[in-house]
Structures are given as C-alpha cells and as structure tokens.
Image (spheres, coloured by chain):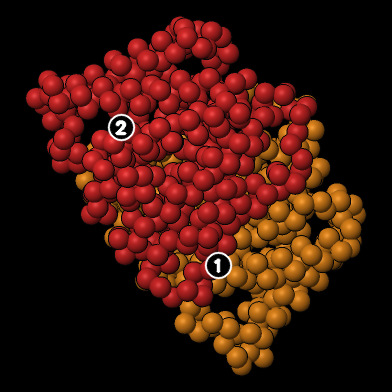
Chain colours: A orange, B red
Amino acid sequence: MNNFLQRLLVALIGIPIILGAAIAGGIWFFILVQIIAVGVLYEFYRLAERKETHPHYIIGLAGLTGILIFFAYQSLSDVFGYEYRISDEIEFIATVGLFFILLSVVYELYRHKGSSFLNIGTTMFGVSYVGVGLGTFIGLRELFDSGAIIILILFSIWVCDTAAYLGGKATGKNKLYAAISPNKTVEGALFGLVFAVITSVVCKYLFVDTLALHDAVVIGLIVGIVGQVGDLAESMLKRDAGVKDSSAFFPGHGGFLDRFDSIIFVSPAVYLYVMTGMNF
Amino acid sequence: MNNFLQRLLVALIGIPIILGAAIAGGIWFFILVQIIAVGVLYEFYRLAERKETHPHYIIGLAGLTGILIFFAYQSLSDVFGYEYRISDEIEFIATVGLFFILLSVVYELYRHKGSSFLNIGTTMFGVSYVGVGLGTFIGLRELFDSGAIIILILFSIWVCDTAAYLGGKATGKNKLYAAISPNKTVEGALFGLVFAVITSVVCKYLFVDTLALHDAVVIGLIVGIVGQVGDLAESMLKRDAGVKDSSAFFPGHGGFLDRFDSIIFVSPAVYLYVMTGMNF
C-alpha cells in the first residue's frame, strides 16, 4: 500500500473518532484525550532515553492523569459557577496525581541509574508539557456548550499544515529555520497562517454562530502562529534526541508526538485567551 | 564568631520572622514563602548547572509564582465554599504562570546552549519540586483559621532534626544510608521520629485545641517519616551535583535548600491528609 493510501486510511478512521468524541464531550472526550496523552508521553520518554536519562514512566503517567483531571474539573466549575462541583473524590485523585511529582524524587533514592537530577527533570518535563498542552484541550471542550470549538481548532490546524506544505512546495524560497526543520519555508508558513485564519472564520459561520468574528480571527491567528511554533519546537526536541519521527504508530503520519504537537501548543494559548475574557 | 553563636543568631532573627508571618497569614505569609521559594529555586538551578544543564531562571520563577498563587487561591476557595472568590485577575496570573512552562520550550528554539531536552527538564523539575512543596505550605496556612498548624509543623520539624542529631550522636551505631548521607544513623532517625510525634501532640495541647489527638499523631508521623526522607532526597540531589551545602546563605545553617528541604516534603503530605477528610 503506498504512502498516500495509508495516510488516507488512517485519516478516514481517525478523524471520525476524534470528531465524535469532541461532540459527545464529557467522559468520552476525556477518555480519548487520555489515550492520546499516554501515547505522546510514552514517545516523549523514549526520546528522553536517547539523551541518556531514565524517566519514570509510571510516575509520569500518574502525574499527567492528575493534571488532565484537574483541567476537566476546573472548566466544569467555571461553567457552572462553582455550584456544580464534581465529587470530592475526583478532586482527591487530581491532588494525588500532582503529588506523584514528589514521589519520583523519593523513588530515585532507591534507583541508582544515571543522574537523579536528569531522570526527574525529564519526567517532570513530560508531565508538564503533555499535561498542560492536552489538559487545556479537555478544558476548552468543557468551557463551551458543544464540541464546535474543538472541531474549529482541529480543522484550522489541519488546513494550516496542508496549506503550509503545499504553499511552501509551490512558492517556497526562503528557509524558515534550516538548522531545525530544513524543509519548512517562510512562504509556506505564511500560507499556513492565512489559511488557518480563513478556516477558523469559515467554521464560525458554518457551525459556531455564538463565536464573535474577531474571536474567530484571533483563534485562527493563534493556530497559524503558535501552532507552527509548536511544530518547530517538537522538531527541535527530536533533533536534540537524534530522531526524525517520534514513532511509526500511525502509518504515514509518524507517531503521537508528530501528530499532536500543534494541539499541545495551540490549546494552552486558546485556553488563556478564552479565560481572559472572550465572550462566549 | 564561632559556629554555634552564628547558628543561634540566625535562629534568633529568622524564627520570629517565620512565626510572625505564619500568625499574620494572608499576604504576609505568602510574601515570606515567595521569598523563601525564590532562594530555594535559585540554589536548585545552581545545582542543575553543575550537571551541565542550563535551566531558565526567569521562566522558572514565573512558573513557580503561578503555582504558589494557585495554592493560595485554591485553599481560600475551599474555606469560603467558593462564594469568596479572589478576583479573576489573580486566577489569570496563576494561569499565566502555568503557561510559562510552554514558553520555556519556545525559548530553547533561540538559545543553542547545551541540550534543549535537559535544560527544560531541570527548569520544570525546579518549578514542580519547589512549587508543590511550598505552594501546599501556603495552602495549609489558609485552610486553617490561624497559623497554629504551621507553627506546629515547624516546631515538629525543628525538634525532629535536633533529636535525630543528638540521639544519633549519643547512641547511633547503624548507618541509615551511608552512600548518600554518611553521618545519619537508624537510631538517630528513630529518635527524630519519636520526638516529632511528641512535639506535635504537645503543640496540639498547648495551642491547637481544635486538632483531634489522632490527627496530631498522624502529622507528627508525617514529619518524622516524610520529613527525614526529604532530607535524604536533598542529600541525594546535592551528591549528584557534587556539593555539600546548597549555599552558605544562612551562616552555620547552609543554604535555602538545606534549611527548607523537610518542609518541601512534609507540606504536600500533610496537605493531602487534610484534604482527604481530616476534621478541623
């Protein structure tokens, strides 16, 4: 099967699952993002091992899950004005998750494998990078009544990537950041940015009536700028670790980290924008 | 001036400041802990530099401050049943602080100094270690009506340290963990544990009437066990970095990290115990 067909097949299976979970929301979206987060964290820690460090997989996973639950909980509280409180048990789980951070320090006392400092460092890095990046993605879903904002962001990211690739191929002359990502061009990045904004605005008129036009433009700009910076940042980490793709989990698409790097950067930025007083 | 007098002088100045801030609570305790946190983080990052990494001081400080504000806010909300909300501005600052985590990833794109992976790793490690450790210390102060619980914990830690030192000197035969901390003995640790519990119970009767006896015993056990493990963990990190004291900031007492290592471990554990249904 050639690469294009593989990519298409993965997309035909993957996209409906993601859109369905975004629409369903609540526990379904949480489960999907949790699965993605596990995949991303795993690949991240594999990269860290190439830098001669030994992250703690289990402790990292526990910490990550705690942060995801925290964001889900935080958002629901905001929507329902603190009257609707998820049960204290869930708050407890989130608290426990955060404290796994200190557990990893204690664990190192009995480990004797490489540098404690660096082992804990890469463990924490993974937890916070993936936790904040995908936790805010869950948070965004629950801040709105429907999954429409999630779908708008995803479409905007996908169109941005495609426009940057095709636009760069057709017109690209000036390298964007040759040392990190030799195939990316300034022209491609501008194509990506313009089409990210257009897609966000089109989605607003198609299925997110409640979103103000200027908010749709800002979200498009965030996708076009922050999302492409996220791409570069992930390339930098892979280059530091000496690999090209984070894994080959999705045939033709690379690994979890390759596929979800933009979301990890875009979500916190949009979340921050929404929290600071966007009307919705 | 000999070492004993130096130690005494530092204690005579430092202890009233800490106790005063604990009693005053609110912004005063927050400011004191923030100052301590800055000192601890700075020394922590100096250690990290000895492991050939280059943590981001400013970004780490911003992330740390975000976490401290988060815990202060979280606790106040709990006490006042979510009706008393600190202004949205503060929530905003805390959110911004957390997002500095992702900023540090972007910053590495333009830095070219050592390994991005490890630079960010040690930055995150410092933020979460110091942030959760001292953030919960602020949280504990605000969960209770007065500073009594903070004073109980501090007395318990100080007596535990002294009892472990003197008891170990008088009766110590078996090394606790020679590879990390050659002077500590099992006998000393047991002295520390017993006196931590006694101190906690005595403080309960002296000035924390509202605390149940079994809660005072549990807090003493946490100080005696978790606090001494925290000591060991910090010794491990210093040993990994190849230094004896984290700094000489407090004459005769070592640095911030040496002086506040137990609190960083004890606070999250007590906070977790309180959150999971201790009656107070």
Image mark 1: chain = B
The span from disc 1 to disc 2 (Cα, nearest Å) is 35 Å
Q: Amino acid at mark 1?
A: Val
From where the camera sits, is residue A60 visible?
no
Q: Callout 2: 10 Å neighbours few (<14), some, many (20+)?
A: many
Quadrant in which the C terminus of chain B is drawn: top right
Q: Foreground: A197 or A81?
A: A81
Q: Quadrant of the N terminus of chain B?
A: top left
Per the image, the residue denoted by label 1 is: B106
Considering only order in the chain, which callout, 2 or 1, is on the residue closer to the N terminus? 1
Is residue B84 at least partly visible in the picture? Answer: yes
Q: Are marks 1 and 2 on the same chain?
A: yes
Q: Are there few (<14), some (14-19), or many (20+) residues within 10 Å of tag 1?
A: some
Three-letter amino acid code at the position of disc 2: Val
Q: Where's residue A278, x and y in %?
A: 82, 53
For label 1, the SS is: helix
* Residue corresponding to mark 2: B229
Residue B65 versus residue A239 in the image, above or below: above
Q: Tell me, for residue A173, which label it has, or none.
A: none
Vertical arrangement, residue B48 with respect to residue A29, above or below: below
Classify residue B160 by image quadrant: top left
Is A60 positioned to the left or the right of A37 in the image? Answer: left
The local secondary structure at tag 2 comes to helix
